[in-house]
Amino acid sequence: MDCRIRIAVQEQDFSLEAEGRVLQALPNVGALVSFSGLVREDHEGQKIDALFLEHYAGMTERSLEAIAREAASRWPLHAITIIHRIGTLRPGEQIVFVGVSSAHRAAAFSACEFLMDYLKTRAPFWKKCMLAGQSFWVEAKGSDSDAAERWRQD
Amino acid sequence: MIEIHYFASIRERLACDRETLDTAPPTVAALVDALVERHGETWQRVLRDGRVLVAVNQEVASLQSALREGDEVAFFPPVTGG
């Protein structure tokens, strides 16, 4: 089955409602699952002013497309949308959107979780925390690698 | 010629976002040797940190990966998007 894939890496915000409509606008869609990530107010107990998102232009889009194609090969999906914001983002702002539509819910639930787990460990984005007078890079978490590892197919 | 890009904490620690090398070394490991030779101790410390990731032509690669003229190589820390 052909799966429609939409990838966007952008500074602008996105609309959950508009993205949901795009994912539904295909014949025989019976399920829509989406995940949105938001910027938290604190990072490991420290209140932050903003997050700065750096990325590797070109490789980012390629890796997100590869992750989406991988999901489309594992589950019968109608459409996939991945949007990731870059630049300076304040607490409460939306940072990432992953949405999947399919005929039945099981595929959409699994694919959405798979896409987020792979995005977090494979797409070249880096977060920097900005707070009063200082900034530091966020360290990668082992729990994210573990989450991605459970989808491995040997 | 090959082009080398550095990202995030690696870019900041090296105070360099990109540079070029006139001829492509045979492998990524040989490229690291050439860069350490060119720049010295800081680069040795940063690039030989076992957690540094490398991509060749925007695909994840390893120290053993072969290089050819015109390749784009990037060094970066583990990713933290999402």
Image (tube, helix red, strand yellow):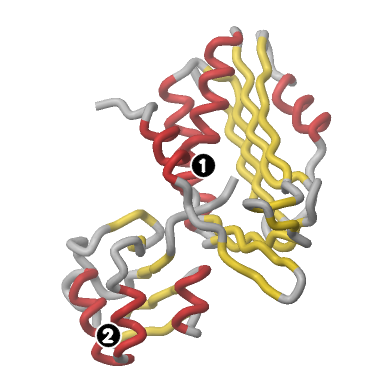
Q: Image quadrant for the C terminus of chain A?
A: top left
Q: Secondary structure at mark 2?
A: helix
**How many neighbours does mark 1 have within 10 angstroms: few (below 14), some (14-19), or many (20 or more)?**
many
Question: x, y (%) of residue A73?
Answer: 42, 24
Residue A82's disc is none
Chain name for mark 1: A
Residue B38 sits in which quadrant? bottom left
- Image mark 2: chain: B
Instruction: Determine if marks 1 and 2 fall on one subunit.
Output: no
Looking at the picture, which amino acid does disc 1 mark? Leu
Relative to A129, A112 lies left or right: left
The residue that disc 2 covers is: B36
Where, by quadrant of the figure, is residue A66 drawn?
A: top left
Q: Front-most of B53 and A146?
A: A146
User: Quick one: B65 or B80, which is closer to the camera?
Assistant: B80
The residue that mark 1 highlights is A119
Residue at screen point 76% across, 50% down = A41
Q: Residue at x 61, y 25 (%)?
A: A79
Q: Secondary structure at mark 1?
A: helix
Instruction: Tell me how far mark 1 sits from mark 2, CA to CA.
Output: 32 Å
- Vertical side of A91 occupied by B35: above or below: below
Q: Amino acid at mark 2?
A: Val
Q: Is residue A52 left or right of residue A15?
A: left
> Which residue is more in the foreground, A87 or A102?
A87
Residue at the farthest front position: A45
Total numbered circles: 2
